[in-house]
Each structure stands twice: as C-alpha cells, then as structure tokens.
Amino acid sequence: MKTERRSSDTDFPENLITAVGTEKVCGAGKFAPLTAEQTAGPEYALSTLKPREADMLLLHFEMRKTYTEIGMYYGRSYTCVYQVITKAIRKLRYPSRLRYYAISTPEE
C-alpha cells in the first residue's frame, strides 16, 4: 500500500532529517525553511528504501502515526513496526544516502 503524501505538514522532512541525525552533516540548530531542491534530497533517499520501509517512515514522521497505529494498518505488531522503522533510519544514515541531506543552517 502506497501512503498518500500530505503537503500541509511543515515539520516534514525536518523531523525525519533530525531523526536520521544529520547534525554531523549540516550542523546543529534550527533549519532554514527548506527549498524544493533541498527537500528533493531526503525524498530521493526515501525512494532508495524498500516500499514498506518508506511508507512506515512517512506514516510515522509525516502523518504522525504511532507504532501501534501503523501496526494495525499493516497487520503487524508494535515490535515489528519499531524494528522496520529503526532499520530504515539506520539505512538512511549510511554515508551513501547521507550525502543527500546537504542542508544549510541559517546564518547567525
């Protein structure tokens, strides 16, 4: 099942970028408003994951569903959903995917 994308959530993909831990790449602090070019990187990195992993990440980070709600949607347990999401986040931390998160922080 492909998850429908919502454009009204202003925290996405910033909340996913924070979960991946890109402070090492783009520095700590608040993010500047992301441009279309900057959001293309994380979206491309998501497209390199398996469809179930990408959908579960979108459900959790974009639609703010809990692991239990996602588990009910997929017919899986809380633990299974947790494992899939944490594995997907680990995959997004690979250096080959992390380079797509080149996001600048606001100048202070």
Image (tube, rainbow, N blue to C red):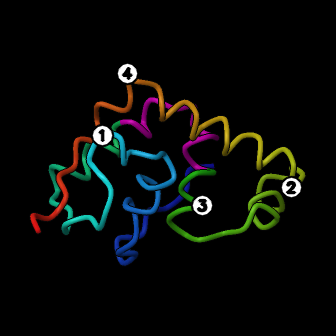
- Considering only order in the chain, which callout, 1 or 2, is on the residue closer to the N terminus? 1
Q: Nearer the viewer, mark 4 or mark 1?
A: 1
- Considering only order in the chain, which callout, 3 or 2, is on the residue closer to the N terminus? 3
What's the residue at 26%, 64% (across, down)? 31
Q: Quadrant of residue 50?
A: top right
Q: Which residue is mark 1?
A: 25
- Indicate the position of residue 8 as horizontal and vertical percent values: 36, 78
The Cα–Cα distance between marks 4 and 1, rounded to whole angstroms, is: 13 Å
What's the residue at 56%, 50% (across, down)? 2
Tell me which amino acid carries mark 1: Val
Report the span colored magenta. Answer: 45-55
Q: Nearer the viewer, mark 3 or mark 1?
A: 1
- Considering only order in the chain, which callout, 4 or 3, is on the residue closer to the N terminus? 3
Compared to 39, does 25 lie above or below?
A: above
Tell me which amino acid carries mark 3: Leu
Q: Which residue is mark 3?
A: 59
The Cα–Cα distance between marks 2 and 4, rounded to whole angstroms, is: 29 Å
Q: Which residue is mark 2?
A: 78
- Indicate the position of residue 16 as horizontal and vertical percent values: 46, 55
The Cα–Cα distance between marks 2 and 3, rounded to whole angstroms, is: 14 Å
Compared to 9, does 86 lie above or below?
A: above
> Element at badge 4?
helix
